[in-house]
Image (cartoon, rainbow, N blue to C red):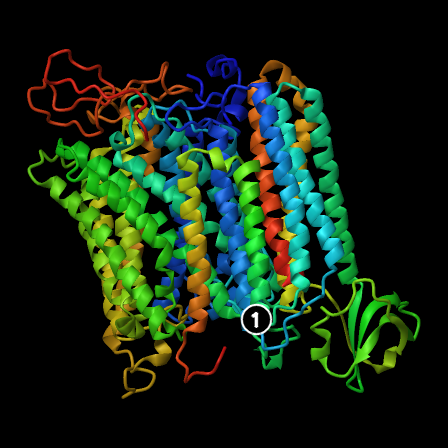
């Protein structure tokens, strides 16, 4: 006896098996990201007044990434619609776009991560703090050069929302012997960055995972399309549902991390 | 799509027994692996009980082996405090996540559920195989942590930060990675179970004709699906704390070993507790619900009458599932909670006891007027009822914040939950093994040794856990490597609230009971393996004369289970129906044409 | 959406998808724009941003994920999920806020 309802929907539920499966899985993903969002709320509410960062992320770049994902969402649904309308060629076109957009998203995200990992906070022995992006950090040299500024109170580093994203900083040369502590803006730097890297990192893993699945369908799809087009269309739909969920998460991530 | 039967003629050893997608093979794989972990977890407990009863003395016989494997922390074969903590953490982790859940949910569920609903397999067979493999990988990671320098995790199965973050060993990190693998396995399994039960019920198998076991597994799957992800998120964050030096759960000003930790701070240890218990409370229902399902099946079968209150059972199990998500902070009454939030959780906690009592009551009433057959499965199941009753009732003082202040983190808690899991769940699982053994192998397990196993296990489990209630009420705390010697009257005579010599003396009693309990499992292990080839052959494909669909197949069921989808005509417990020739009517038996006996139900009634 | 394919019908669906796409683009732009508007109280900015995000989420879930025409069973599953997610968030945040005031703030 073969497993029923793998393609044709079961009459009383109106669903085929994989669709039930993917929605169940997405429900668990809602709980996963939900727990992380809850943690974000708690960490932020628990932070002392004035010590939660604002404006640390590049809004134009984040907006671009949002538009990239939204576009990939429409191409995904169009890919499925093309299958439904029996147009395999258009399916290939739309999902090629989806895959390229996914790669674009990951590239932009990598650029953003790189930006954080080259951003240093240097506490000097005289109590001042130098903060900026690394220009020169030759271990043999006795100076570290960053493009940044000095502040006297760490609190001044937290609210950068007034600053333009394309603001240019002066270059500062700091003698190594004056440095008490030098730390870059990684997840260890404060809880905002910790939750930022964790949320966006987990999301990026989902983007990559979804892109891999869609790529697999794109590269190997013709065989199943020719033997069982309905089953293939269902696979496209199910992977599309996952992709839309990934987009949904970003729709909330973007304002939460970048804007508010 | 080609038929599966032809495909499996030449599958070979590896595809048939190791990399199988057949739910029955996977069920057995889960079962065997889980039983091995159950034994291993038991051995860890024995080592702990030795240390408690004989603090600072070398473990007899295997002391040198312990020292060889575990290194300096087991120097001279003595269970040092650090080693005790390792055993404690791993005993809990292994028993919950590697033994009971895989056995109760994955093993029994995988084997029985598709058969009971009349399906050819699970909805997603390859996902099923993947979930077993993820389980094995998680288990291997957990076991590997024992032989890493520094040993395995030692922060309890609850892995509270900041302790769990401050322990510098790789073993502690491996625990987190192992947990992520196990969570993945459970999530994949949960998706499979729910989709299967929704989509693959045979024609005529409406929701209210499902065996109670299937309902129990259905709700269990939902608990796993929705409750595990927050722990996965928390595990990721704790891993980040350990490896990337973030401060999700580390507060500002944390000092480790007298020195200020070089961290950003700003995190909250309570956040870990909330996320952990959000899973871990539904998890305990995951431990008990499949057992209740098994109990229901075996009671109906061995009383030769329908379960009393089927609808109440179904609604109760759904209610338990729902409520279990909003009671978790009753594990956190002593974290400095305010009155309002504590009241909320006390209220939901007490309310959730109601459906549990309803289920137990329905089971008890089901015995009334029954034509009871006292075979081994039935003995275990009948013992389950009062044992679970004790476990459940002793939970009430823990559910109320006021009394929990005195009992929290004492041996009373240990006694409470072990009563539920040991003479509770594990008894039901033993019953299930004796019960379904003939369907899997075509042979019966030996009845005499089954009874020996039952009586000895019942007696010694009670001997182990009953005294712990007294010890807990006397103030003996959990997780103390010296068994409370530091707080005893013997150490400090006249100490107010000090543990009396009676309370301390119970440790020896418990140790001997544990040894005897271990010995009592030997007949079971021998019986299990010996009966596979030499057990008395089952008289038929349905030796228990049961009504549910898994007994209406050949033995063992072939790949694909049923040649054609069975047509279900009636409910799951049509035993002793008046005016019938036999005292049971299988669910798929064709309807008699006599008027008055026919109650046609449409094929695919709305769910 | 599980119905037999009818290419003509689908063009009607495709138009709907395009409208949703434009709405999402628009929604993104106004989210960013609104974040720069000084409402005085920062909480209002948060509320506006989340409100617009919820609107966009509704469009993606409703139209791209076909939820608007999906079966009751999926709604039911999601309703429970949302309830438990809300419970996790609300109860945890509430628990953090409710503690005996005489103890030291954590």
Tag 1, which secondary structure? Answer: loop
Side of B474 where C30 appears, left or right = right
Q: Position of residue A159 (x, y in %)?
A: 70, 72
Q: Who is closer to the viewer here, B229 or B498? A: B229
Q: What subunit carries mark 1?
A: B
**Looking at the image, which residue is at 55% across and 57% down?**
A36
Residue at image location 65% in from the left, 29% down from the top: A79
The picture quadrant where one finds residue B165 is bottom right
Is residue B156 visible in the rendered image? The answer is no
In the image, taking residue A115 as reference, residue A170 lies left or right, namely right
The image shows residue B338, relative to residue A206, as above or below, that is: below
Answer above or below: position of B176 versus B210.
Answer: below
- Can residue C94 be seen from the camera position used here? yes
Task: Answer above or below: position of B418 versus B210.
Answer: below
Q: Quadrant of residue A176?
A: bottom right
Q: Residue B471 location in percent, x, y?
A: 26, 70
**In the foreground, A225 or B554:** A225
Which residue is drawn at the image coordinates 34% and 71% (left, top)?
Answer: B340
Question: Callout 1 environment at 10 Å: few (<14), some (14 to 19), or many (20+)?
Answer: many
- Would you place residue B495 above or below residue A215 in this image? below
**Residue B10 coordinates in the image, percent (x, y):** 53, 15
Toward the right, the furthest residue is A141
Give the x, y percent position of residue A250: 62, 50
Side of B120 relative to A255 (left or right):
left
Q: Is residue B277 left or right of residue A250?
A: left
How many marks on residues? Answer: 1
Which part of the image, by quadrant, shows the C terminus of chain B?
top left
Q: Nearer the viewer, residue A213 or B582?
A: A213
Q: Which residue is mark 1?
A: B250
């Amino acid at each position: 006896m073969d497993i029923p309802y793998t393609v044709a929907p079961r009459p009383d539920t109106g669903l085929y098996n994989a669709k039930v499966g993917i929605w169940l899985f997405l429900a668990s993903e809602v709980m996963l990201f939900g727990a992380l969002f809850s943690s974000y709320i708690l960490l932020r509410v628990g932070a002392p007044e004035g010590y939660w960062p604002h404006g640390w992320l590049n809004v134009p770049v984040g907006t671009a990434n949002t538009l990239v994902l939204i576009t990939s969402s429409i191409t995904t649904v169009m890919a499925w619609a093309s299958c439904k309308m029996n147009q395999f060629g258009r399916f290939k076109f739309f999902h090629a776009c989806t895959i390229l957009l996914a790669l674009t998203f990951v590239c932009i995200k990598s650029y953003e991560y790189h930006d954080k990992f080259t951003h240093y906070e240097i506490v000097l022995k005289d109590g001042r703090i130098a903060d900026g992006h690394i220009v020169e950090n030759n271990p043999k040299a006795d100076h570290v050069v960053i493009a940044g500024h000095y502040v006297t109170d760490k609190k001044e580093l937290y609210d950068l929302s007034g600053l333009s994203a394309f603001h240019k900083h002066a270059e500062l040369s700091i003698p190594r012997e004056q440095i008490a502590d030098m730390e870059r803006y990684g997840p260890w730097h404060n809880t905002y960055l910790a939750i930022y890297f964790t949320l966006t990192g987990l999301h990026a893993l989902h983007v990559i995972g979804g892109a891999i699945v869609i790529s697999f369908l794109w590269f190997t799809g013709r065989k199943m399309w020719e033997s069982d087009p309905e089953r293939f269309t269902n696979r496209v739909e199910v992977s599309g549902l996952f992709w839309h969920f990934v987009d949904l998460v970003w729709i909330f991530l973007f304002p939460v991390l970048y804007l508010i | 799509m080609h038929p599966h039967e032809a495909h499996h003629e030449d599958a070979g050893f590896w595809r048939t027994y190791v990399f199988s997608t057949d739910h029955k093979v996977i069920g057995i794989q889960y079962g065997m692996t889980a039983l091995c972990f159950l034994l291993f977890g038991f051995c860890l407990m024995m080592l702990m009980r030795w240390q408690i009863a004989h603090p600072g003395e070398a473990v007899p016989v295997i002391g040198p082996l312990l020292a060889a494997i575990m290194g300096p922390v087991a120097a001279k074969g003595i269970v040092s405090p650090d080693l005790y903590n390792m055993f404690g953490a791993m005993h809990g982790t292994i028993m919950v996540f590697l033994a009971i859940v895989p056995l109760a949910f994955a093993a029994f569920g995988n084997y029985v559920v598709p058969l009971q609903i009349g399906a050819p397999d699970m909805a997603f067979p390859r996902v099923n195989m993947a979930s077993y493999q993820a389980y094995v990988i998680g288990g291997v990671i957990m076991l590997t942590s024992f032989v890493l320098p520094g040993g395995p995790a030692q922060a309890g199965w609850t892995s509270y930060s900041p302790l769990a973050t401050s322990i510098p060993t790789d073993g502690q990190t491996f625990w987190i990675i192992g947990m992520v693998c196990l969570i993945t396995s459970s999530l994949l399994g949960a998706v499979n179970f729910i989709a299967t039960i929704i989509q693959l019920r045979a024609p005529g198998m409406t929701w209210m004709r499902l065996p109670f076991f299937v309902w129990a597994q259905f709700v269990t799957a939902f608990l796993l699906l929705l409750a595990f992800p927050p722990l996965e998120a928390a595990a990721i964050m704790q891993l980040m704390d350990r490896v990337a030096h973030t401060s999700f759960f580390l507060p500002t000003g944390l000092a480790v070993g007298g020195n200020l930790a070089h961290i950003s701070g700003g995190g909250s240890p309570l956040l870990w507790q909330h996320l952990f218990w959000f899973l871990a409370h539904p998890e305990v229902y995951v431990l008990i619900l499949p057992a209740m399902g098994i109990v229901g099946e075996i009671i109906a079968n061995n009383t030769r009458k329908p379960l009393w209150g089927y609808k109440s059972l179904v609604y109760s199990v759904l209610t338990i599932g729902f409520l279990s998500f909003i009671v978790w902070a009753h594990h956190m009454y002593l974290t400095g909670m305010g009155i309002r939030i504590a009241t909320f959780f006390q209220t939901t906690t007490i309310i959730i006891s109601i459906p549990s009592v309803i289920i137990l009551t329905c089971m008890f009433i089901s015995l009334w007027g029954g034509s009871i057959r006292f075979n081994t499965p039935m003995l275990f199941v009948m013992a389950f009822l009062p044992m679970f009753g004790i476990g459940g009732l002793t939970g009430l003082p823990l559910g109320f914040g006021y009394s929990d202040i005195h009992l929290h983190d004492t041996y009373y808690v240990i006694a409470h939950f072990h009563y539920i899991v040991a003479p509770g769940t594990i008894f039901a699982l033993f019953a299930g093994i004796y019960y379904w053994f003939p369907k899997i192998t075509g042979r019966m397990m030996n009845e005499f040794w089954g009874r020996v196993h039952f009586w000895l296990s019942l007696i010694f489990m009670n001997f182990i856990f009953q005294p712990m209630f007294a010890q807990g009420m006397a103030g003996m705390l959990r997780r103390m490597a010296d068994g409370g010697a530091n707080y005893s009257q013997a150490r400090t005579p006249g100490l107010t609230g000090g543990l009396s010599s009676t309370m301390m003396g119970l440790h020896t009693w418990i140790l001997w009971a544990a040894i005897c309990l271990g010995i009592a499992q030997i007949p079971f292990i021998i019986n299990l393996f010996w009966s596979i080839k030499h057990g008395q052959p089952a008289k038929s494909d349905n030796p228990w004369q049961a009504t549910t669909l898994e007994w209406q197949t050949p033995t063992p069921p072939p790949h694909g289970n049923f040649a054609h989808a069975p047509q279900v005509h009636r409910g799951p417990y049509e035993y002793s129906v008046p005016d019938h020739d036999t005292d049971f009517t299988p669910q798929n038996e064709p309807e008699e044409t006599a008027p008055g006996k026919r109650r046609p139900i449409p094929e695919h009634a709305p769910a | 959406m599980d119905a037999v394919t009818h290419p003509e019908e689908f063009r009607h669906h495709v138009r709907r998808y395009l409208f949703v796409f434009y709405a999402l683009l628009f929604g993104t732009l106004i989210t960013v724009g609104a974040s720069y508007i000084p409402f005085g109280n920062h909480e209002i900015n948060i509320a506006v941003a989340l409100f617009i995000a919820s609107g966009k989420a509704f469009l993606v879930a409703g139209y791209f994920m076909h939820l608007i025409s999906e079966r009751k069973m999926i709604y039911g599953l999601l309703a429970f999920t949302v309830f438990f997610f809300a419970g996790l968030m609300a109860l945890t945040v509430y628990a953090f806020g409710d503690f005996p005031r005489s103890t030291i703030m954590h």
